[in-house]
Amino acid sequence: MPARHLIIGGGTAGLNAIRTIREEDGGASEITLVSAERPYSRMVLPYYLGASIAESHVYTATPASLAAWKVKAMLGRRAKSLDTGAQKLTLDDGSTVEYDDCLIATGSRAARPPVAGADGPGVHSFWTLEEARAVIAAVQPGTRVVMVGAGFISFTILNAILSRGASLTIVEVAPRILPRMVDEACAGIVASWLVKHGVTLRVGATLTGIEEWKGKRRLTFKKGDPILADVVIMATGIRTNLEWLEGSGIQVSSEPGGGILVDDRLRSSVKNVYAAGDVARGPNLLTGTLEVHAIEPTAQEHGRVVGANMAGRDLAYRGSLIMNIVEVCHLDVASFGQWDNPKAQVFTATRTPRSQYRKLLFEGGRLTGAMICGPAEDIWSTNDVGMLKGLVYSGVDLSRWKAHLERNPFDIKPAYIASHTAGALLPTTNLGRASRSPQLPHQVMVQ
Amino acid sequence: MRVLALHPEKCTGCLRCELACSYMQTGTYQPSKSVIRVSPFEGYTSYAPYTCTQCAEGWCMTACPVGAIRINAAGAKDVVDDKCVGCKLCTIACPFGTMFYDADTTKAYKCNLCEGHPACADACPTEAITFVEGQTADWIGDFAAERTTRVLARESA
């Protein structure tokens, strides 16, 4: 009897797992996908909001492609409970699916703070496709938008809101913007840039309530004046979708961030149940510590490694590198690795007139964190963004370059090349083989 | 498959490869938009070209959330313009620094081996860039290590 694989969740992790199983087995196994939504990419929703792509562009699978991959798709259904003893999933409509092995990839959802009115009319989140549609309908030329939260999620939709002709105010509880993605110096550069481009920022502002006022939303704060808005977008973090696993016996971390505890094969405490993406507390590449990264590249790598292991490979996962990039009004900002490590040796450089910033963080001879900021036209005339990733990811020894990089943190290219970083990285693959072109699984033959 | 083999000891720093590449990739003669980049060493006395190795992992390709990077007939990872939304995830996934973003088109772009007829290799007058059957490699690491040793020693003196 062919193996019966069950994938719970049709996001990045789940779809990557399915594609990889098919790359490995060519269609020999049974795959069932249970997904509350039709698979789409959250990463590209901001471009749908900005009207640079159509809604059809966001989907990562169609009924036809799922059929071609020999996937039994149960869409529009939610997982309700998992019986790991009987190896059986119960869905919200009461139906059940039996499995030989299963992947939990139920992702996360937008969270709102416990503030009066935070769930009221005219208050949105931007996480799912349905939420994106609601924001698209609400944000028109001249709309006054207030975004609560100045983190990565908020910044990914900033350009799109402005391009819709709306005015934008961002309020943040922390004393500065992007508190979990960049340091204070970089945040200062980005903040000045945004103000220059017409965005209003208010940091250190604790929201106390949102109320209706003459057809508008009135946001009140612990200190300072209230703000009036037509539309409020809450970009105040995410919560993993794990509540449904209560009683399943799957071990979930009690540390902040939670997440299903996984081993180096990305198996949960129940060995034929894997976890991937935002719900998995997987290893950090640099420290080995188990963490929830909740970023797209981690979900992709998790999904691919799990897919290979479900297909019978025995692959250890190296771990994920935390990294983010966001472009706001043609200013690029990216950070890699342990950029806020207080024990690291830190070299920074700023070119104020050009809004450029670099930060390099060393532990011994190894670069373990980096930050880069600058106008798009400057950043992409160098190879520096990816080279910083490569230096952090490979951990090549930069001892003989440290003095040079301390004097000029911008000059990483000769250090990268002369340290044989490319040579160290070339043999590295996540699946122990060359990756396949993404369209290939369409060729899976129906037997 | 055929790969771009780079021979830095033959590079004169003439930048014809960058001109040819930028024209092929973006339709304009702008070395700043080339996906092959020539770096100077030892105070502009020697040079080495650097470009995508078409690595086995294909970090850019596996990172793309919409499957917009695919392997073309020449075996190169290639951006499908109609699918790319410009999210730049590929640019932080690539650990070689060889994914680029064109602010004019708002798309990512990279070396696609010019579909099998690389303009950089054609343009190189000294055969510092050749398109040959074989394995890719860290073509310029040894050269750069040797050409930077004296500079670093002088700096620390």
Image: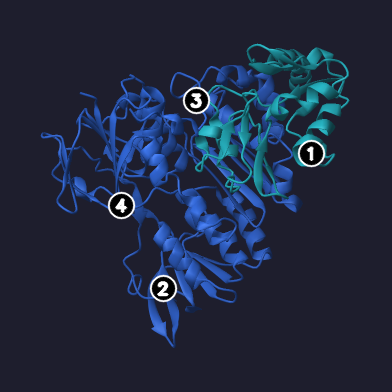
Chain colours: A blue, B cyan
Nearest-to-viewer mark from 1 and 2: 1
Which residue does the numbered mark 3 point to in the structure image? Answer: A435
Q: Which mark is residue B32?
A: 1
How packed mark 2 is, by other alpha carbons closer than 10 Å (few <14, some 14-19, many 20 or more), is few
| For residue A170, above or below residue A151 | below
Which residue does the numbered mark 4 point to in the structure image? Answer: A36
Q: Which mark is residue A222?
A: 2
Q: Please tell me if label 3 and label 1 are on a single chain.
A: no
Check disc 1 and report its element: helix, strand or loop.
Answer: helix
Q: How far apart are labels 4 and 1 at the CA level?
A: 45 Å
Q: Residue at x 25, y 47 (%)?
A: A242
Q: How far apart are labels 3 and 1 at the CA level?
A: 30 Å
Check disc 3 and report its element: helix, strand or loop.
Answer: loop
Q: Residue A202: x, y in percent? A: 53, 67
**Marked residue chain, label 1:** B
Q: Amino acid at mark 4?
A: Ala
Q: Amino acid at mark 1?
A: Ser
Q: How far apart are labels 4 and 2 at the CA level?
A: 38 Å
Q: Please tell me if label 3 and label 4 are on a single chain.
A: yes
| For residue B74, above or below residue A177 | above
Q: Amino acid at mark 2?
A: Lys
Q: Residue A335: x, y in percent? A: 55, 42
Chain-order first, disc 2 or disc 3: 2
| For residue A113, above or below residue A259 | below
Q: Residue A329: x, y in percent? A: 65, 57
Nearest-to-viewer mark from 3 and 1: 3
Asked whether A157 or A313 is in front, the reply is: A313
Q: Is residue A358 left or right of residue A431?
A: right
Nearest-to-viewer mark from 4 and 1: 4
